[in-house]
Image: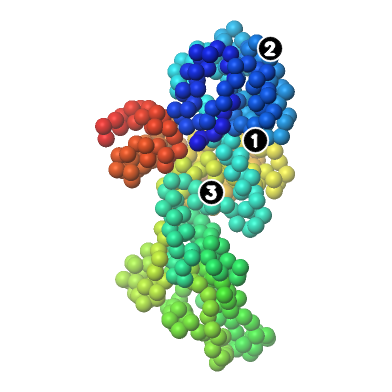
Amino acid sequence: MKGYVLLAEDDETFRSFLQTILEDEGYKVTLAGDGRHAAQLLARESFDLVISDLKMPGKGGLELFRETRNAPSAPPFIFLTAFGTVDEAVAAMKEGAVDFLTKPLPSPNALTAVLDRVMETRLRAKTLVSMRESEIAGLPPEELIFAGMAMRSVHKLVHDVAGTTANVLIYGESGTGKELVARSIHLLSQRSSAPFIPLNCAAIPENLLESELFGHEKGAFTGAIHARQGKFELAGGGTIFLDEIGEMPPALQAKLLRVLQERTFERVGGSREIRADMRVIAATNRNLEEEVSERRFREDLFYRLNVFPLNLPPLRERRDAIPLLVEYFLDRFSRQLGKTVRGLDPAAMEILSVYPWPGNVRELQNVIERGVILAQGVVRCENLPNAMLQASAIEGRDSREVLRGVERDIIVRALEKHKGNRRLAAEELGISRRSLQYKLKDFGLVGE
């Protein structure tokens, strides 16, 4: 079910027509023949949306809206109006109604397009609440980490492997969220109550990396005034995340292999064997098979780590995630900076939609933070980096066509995945079969 709709309309024929459209789209519908009946229903039930005629006997839609708009969890209103009362509908929108439609409807799509937009906005609002709660717990929610159709298979694999003890190797470009996926695996595992210890192998000088991993004893080297635990000890019972594992020097690769094989290690300058009770998740932005063939990475270590590989797609391959990510970062940085930013100008969103994102989600996060700092109410094109504007002008010569192409590709992939079954494809895409059929005709895919 897409949502629960209250339909208030005094014309029985038109009411029945609208009910058919709504139910075909997957909505549960409750009917009211006048404003008073609608008010009674609103007083005792919770609805996701109200579609109301503006003029009804006894109590009109505008009066109904004004009575309920300040109630907790008040549903959004869409008004139905004749051409002669359009001004009143516009006035109602200024008071907070989300949209209006004129009677008679030009086509069923006129209603379904507005419905889809309103329900998507409502769903995002709920998701943001979930995101805030998850952020307090220290990790963004799964809806954000695995946003976009291209991440659905990754999401399933994460749940499949989390409950096991298998080593995981995460592949992905810089900024795709490898550490967030690793943390998700840890939190879904039986080790979730124990520490998650990250270490970026590329960020620590080679002469210090061994000590960071294994710890050291007092006097092991100049400056070792005290004995110190390494990451493997700190991760005891939990998970160690070795980011950019492809940057690990050959000598340390051999020592890491011993830890994985024997589950013991020694501190630098020590002789006492310490038990290594932790799960290893590694990540890289390199092609480790090529590194192995070029003898820059140990083959035996590669096979130890590559028990369960996960490939994270770059942001340019999951552009359908951009609106949700943008909304999340807007909300987050607005709160952090104490600013009220209402959203993105459509032209700015179009640029974000066609930009190639070489820095992936991390770059998007930085762009939105900059935009919030510079914005006056709404993030506009002039609040985006100049390099992005120039790149988008080159990459997005006809941005609308680019966006249509992305949508077409998503639909084609869904149909291929479900072997042409339109019902299953529509369910995965989150649209009705009627909407899918319309899009197939629009993209010239009928018969494919």
Q: Amino acid at mark 2?
A: Gly
Q: Residue furthest bottom?
A: 271
Mark 2 nearby-residue class (10 Å; few <14, some 14–19, many ≥20): few
C-alpha span from label 3 to label 1 = 22 Å
Residue at 70% across / 18% down in the picture? 63
Q: CB of mark 3 within 8 Å of CB of mark 1?
A: no
N-terminal label among 3 and 1? 3
Secondary-structure class at tag 2: loop
Q: Is residue 222 above or below residue 363?
A: below
Residue 58 marker:
2
Horizontal side of residue 17 vs 272, given as left or right = left
Q: Residue furthest top?
A: 84
Q: Amino acid at mark 1?
A: Arg
Q: Which x, y percent locates residue 39?
A: 68, 23
Q: Is residue 345 above or below residue 126?
A: above
N-terminal label among 3 and 2? 2
Q: Is residue 380 above or below residue 247?
A: above
Q: Amino acid at mark 3?
A: Glu
Horizontal side of residue 297 vs 324, given as left or right = left
The image quadrant that residue 127 belongs to is: top right
Q: CB of mark 3 within 8 Å of CB of mark 2?
A: no
N-terminal label among 1 and 2? 2
Residue 143 marker:
3
Residue at 43% across / 32% down in the picture? 432
Secondary-structure class at tag 1: loop
Q: Which x, y percent locates residue 126?
A: 61, 41
Residue denoted by label 1: 342
Residue at 33% across / 44% down in the picture? 418
Mark 3 nearby-residue class (10 Å; few <14, some 14–19, many ≥20): some
